[in-house]
Amino acid sequence: MQVHSYAAMEKGGKLQSFEYELGELGEYDVRIKISHCGLCHSDLHLIDDDWQISEYPLVPGHEIVGEVEKLGNKVSSFKKGDRVGVGWQCGSCLVCDQCKAGYENLCSEKKKTCVGRYGGFADHIDIDGRFVYQIPESLSSAGTAPLMCAGVAVYQPMKHFGVKSGMKVGVIGLGGLGHMAVKFAKAFGCKVTVFSTSSDKRGEARKLGADRFVTDPNDERLNGTLDFIIDTSPASIDWDRYMEILAPLGKLCVVGLPEEKIEVSATSLIGGQKLICGGSIGDRNSMKAMLKFAAEKGIEAQVEVMPMSKVNEAIDTLRKGKVRYRVVLEN
């Protein structure tokens, strides 16, 4: 069948209408009629070939929600008409040590939804059904689309590194990732502190559930007060300063891809047995658990919905930093 999509034809180019044919459906594949697809900063990196992995024409999009339209003959987890989602990863080898241990997201042969293949800025997509996820009925499609990337990107490291009720959690940055981190940390039962250089976001942080909003991390009263800090910002920060803010045995988790190297003094780590760690896209079990938890707690992304046909307008808005907090494109 013919797919209508939007593609960048060259590095940094505006997206254009682009049509292509889907091949035969694989035995494990699911054909999804896309209703919504989130716009992520990773899509901008791919359009601009910042990671030098892009191939053109490039159809971005990896925060996909839609309806199952057709099934491969070995797919038994879904039926036609089911509402499902897809994230950044759409496959792995399933036989390496990481895959066998349930960490398919760490597989060296993992496949990406919009790298080396056409992504979700389209009306249809074929995806390995083993990396497709049922969307709970209580969640809206638009509010769930960013959960498939931004949501699991903060949920998975929080769970993996032991964030739990009663802990004091810091969130650096209040954007697409950061606002999800606030919501999940609050739902875990944590006291949440937001660090942001944008003082105008104070009220928004409170509405999202933050207990404290900090624009000056150098306040010495912060020293030793937080158990876990998640850095969702791409900006460089004073790493040693945030290590001082951590309580003994605290963890600083990086998910925001800062451009510069992370550098800390050895004493920042040794003095309080503190840890710097990283978060990754979620494995399959984390994706399922995240969606279940989000449904139970009523967690959705705060989104601005725009027609798929206005994708370039949406990209411009994101590039200018004017999104609160995620753009979702709708077919």
Image (cartoon, rainbow, N blue to C red):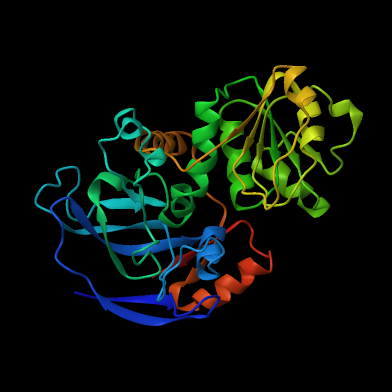
Q: How many marks?
A: 0
Q: Of 21 and 299, which appears nearest the observer?
A: 21
- Looking at the image, residue 99 lies above or below residue 78: above
Residue 93's quadrant in the figure?
Answer: top left
Q: Is residue 105 visible?
A: yes
Position of residue 202 measured from the top left corner of the image (x, y, whole percent): 78, 47
- Looking at the image, residue 90 lies above or below residue 267: below
Position of residue 208 measured from the top left corner of the image (x, y, whole percent): 65, 43
- Looking at the image, residue 134 lies above or below residue 71: above
Q: Is residue 225 visible?
A: no
Position of residue 280 measured from the top left corner of the image (x, y, whole percent): 50, 41
Please give the name of the residue rendered at 76% of the width and 25% of the height, measured from the top-left corner: 266
Residue 261's quadrant in the figure?
Answer: top right
Horizontally, residue 7 falls left or right of residue 67, namely right
Please give the name of the residue rendered at 61% of the width and 74% of the height, measured from the top-left corner: 316
Residue most extreme to the left? 73
Quadrant position of the N terminus in the picture: bottom left
Please give the name of the residue rendered at 80% of the width and 54% of the height, measured from the top-left corner: 200
Position of residue 289 measured from the top left corner of the image (x, y, whole percent): 40, 33
Quadrant position of the C terminus in the picture: bottom left
Q: Of 258 and 109, which appears nearest the observer?
A: 109
Please give the name of the residue rendered at 15% of the width and 61% of the height, measured from the top-left corner: 25
